[in-house]
Image (cartoon, rainbow, N blue to C red):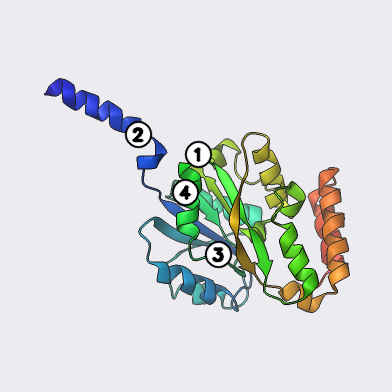
Amino acid sequence: MLVLASMDCNFMLHLPRHFEKMRLSIIIPTYNEADNICDLLGQLHKLDDKRIAEIIIADGGSTDLTCSKALEYPIRLIRSDEKSRANQMNKAAAIAEGDIYYFIHADTRPPISFVDDIEKAWKQGHEIGSYSFKLDSNDFRLKLLSFMTRINMLISRGGDQTLFVTKAFFTKLNGFDEKFVIMEDFDFIRRARKLTKFKLMDKSVLVSARKYAKNNYFTIQRANLTAFLMFYFGVAPHKIKSMYEKRLQG
């Protein structure tokens, strides 16, 4: 009996992922998102899924009611001393208890099935991945832009599509590079793709088109393309951010 017990313990230590239980830490970086945070947290709270270990709000110094509204829900709140998604998300990951991190922007709504989707991808062996997105607008140009995010290329990716990554792989990549005060998601995904296959889900998240309500469509696309090219050719992140903020509002 002692031998059998020993064998059973050894077997349990090497269970394939198919038999393991997923524990998901949802991380939401925020800055002045009082208009959006309750809708997102309300959607997440309704799921009541035991596989969700926690929801962490990583705030970058909001001056509105973001934090007080978020605290109406069962979440963990941390505050960063700087407005930088890379810094905020790293701080949240450092205290997260889950085996998989799922990063969501406050103005993004993941599909209802996202927990199942991530678990399926993880059990298939994927370490990192995201969805494509749909912008909440009937403008045909934004529909075309949304369609382009179905292409699994770096230029088509972005943090607003949400991102899941295992804790082990996040640690292997040393998290987000905090020198990237912009384009931190592109840098992270680029480094990840050098080491593993990036999983693009066959569903989409819904993303607010609020930026397009404040800016001309072509102005945004020129700014996005310029930012990507600056990133690709190694221009300093603070210069990319300065360019982007000068061209766009909100």
First in sequence, mark 1 or 2: give its number. Answer: 2
The residues bearing labels 3 and 1 have C-alpha atoms spaced at a distance of: 21 Å
Identified by mark 3, the residue type is Pro
Tags 4 and 2 touching, CB below 8 Å: no
Identified by mark 1, the residue type is Gly
Q: Secondary structure at mark 2?
A: loop
Q: Point out which mark residue 15 bears.
A: 2
The residues bearing labels 4 and 2 have C-alpha atoms spaced at a distance of: 16 Å
Tags 3 and 4 touching, CB below 8 Å: no
The residues bearing labels 3 and 2 have C-alpha atoms spaced at a distance of: 30 Å
- Image position, residue 118 (x, y; %): 50, 52
Q: Residue under circle 4?
A: 120
16 up-or-down from 162: above or below? above
Quadrant position of residue 133: bottom right
Q: Is residue 82 visible?
A: no
Tags 1 and 2 touching, CB below 8 Å: no
Q: Residue under circle 3?
A: 110
Decide which of 15, 124 is in the foreground and name it. Answer: 124
Quadrant position of residue 5: top left
